[in-house]
Image (spheres, rainbow, N blue to C red):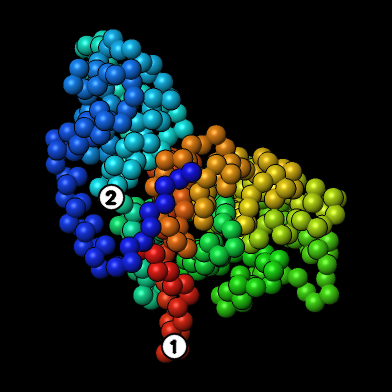
Amino acid sequence: MAFLMNKSQNQNVSETIVSGTTEFGKNKYELEQYILRNLNNSLDINNESSYLGSFDIKIESNDTGFFYIPNLPVSYALDSQLYFKISAICAGILYPFKTLLPQNNAYFVPYDTRNPNSARAFFFPWLDGIPSRLKIDNLASFIKQNISEKSIPIMQNDICNVSTKSVTHFAISGSSGSGKTHFLRYLITCLKSFTSQIICVDPKLSDIYLLSKDLDLEVLAPTHGSNLNSFITEVNELLGRIISKIYERQEILLIEPDKRFERIYIVIDELLALVQGSSKQSREAFGQLLGTIALLGRQTSISLILCSQRFDATAFAGNTAVREQINCVFILGEINANTCQFLLPNTNVENIVVPSGIGTGIVKFTDSEHRTHIMPLLTPTYTIRKEQSTWEIISINIM
């Protein structure tokens, strides 16, 4: 299970301690010795240690991580199991000086290739310090000053900015009360600042429906007296209309290969609630339509933003190919193998240090522009000021 960092009851004392101690991580030699001492005490590698010259620790010159350098021959295997053991130890001891970024497998890099005994090393990438929550006093003013297609800030200090130029499809997962809807509202409001091509689907006729009306967006929601089958049929008709737009754009691209289109966003809230309870025929049609958009949307600037309490094969109506096309995943709430197994299969989340509270979790990008490592996530808090009144959209006391 991922580590949870609990909020101090005294906010001011906690922040003072963190700001004072983060200077420790700036001295490379001191930090190298600190990691060595802890590994010598905790790492069980057949009684070998750095004292016996079995391994060494070096900080990368640009402070993006550290090297574990085995000095061959050694009596232990250089494999993923050893890598994960070192990662598990260091994830905790480096907090709050560094945030270790977990890997799916052992991360080997060449080191001193002049010497065959130290020609390879494990590399452990990190972020300097720990991620901080973005606190926005006035959302409208913040959007005017900071939001563009190239950058939607998610956390403080530009640790996690979403570029809609490179991210095509999003998935937001989280149980009830995890803060996923508040985050989805932030994302939609930011997108509206540079495009009006946003179509929302809200099976619950709730928050996203109200936001869409407020932002003058096209929205599809159940009408009075409609049942699940009739509503998912309406959704399928909408998706069919989007696929027609995809084919239309593909024909244009055959003539003008460099043509750029305004991106269209299809936002579906409570995806699992939409498909559960509907007929088999309706679900299968929905899965096929969603899969077609996911596969063809990248080239034709059509994006999906899918939000659900839980993602599994049922959520995609059996079409798991949709998952393979998602290149930005936000998972809020409890982080463990069960909550992450569908969206992030074969991913080790055991040693991620995740802040506790509402609106926290992990984020994972799969593209050429963003960091592809899993990172701890703290979603923004923000206030909307409208007609001399202020509404606190989400107030989270977890710092």
Within-10-Å neighbours for mark 2: few <14, some 14–19, many 20+: some
185 sits left or right of 319 in the view: left
- Give the quadrant of residue 230: bottom right
Q: In the rendering, which numbered label is found on residue 288?
A: none
Residue visible at 34% across and 31% down in the picture: 86
Residue 156 x, y percent position in the rendering: 33, 59
Residue 191 x, y percent position in the rendering: 50, 64
136 sits left or right of 59 in the view: right
Asked whether 12 or 252 is in front, the reply is 12
The mark closer to the camera, 2 or 1, is 2
Residue visible at 84% across and 75% down in the picture: 225
Q: Look at the numbered disc 1 and give the secondary structure of its residue.
A: strand
Q: Residue placed farthest to the bottom in the image?
A: 388
Within-10-Å neighbours for mark 1: few <14, some 14–19, many 20+: few
| Residue on which the image places disc 2 | 96
344 sits left or right of 246 in the view: left
| Residue on which the image places disc 1 | 389
Query: Which amino acid type is shown beneath numbered disc 1?
Result: Ser
Does residue 118 sit above or below 16 in this rendering?
Answer: above
Asked whether 13 or 133 is in front, the reply is 13
Does residue 327 sit above or below 261 in this rendering?
Answer: above
Q: Can see residue 253?
A: no
Query: Which amino acid type is shown beneath numbered disc 2?
Result: Pro
Residue visible at 45% across and 45% down in the picture: 2
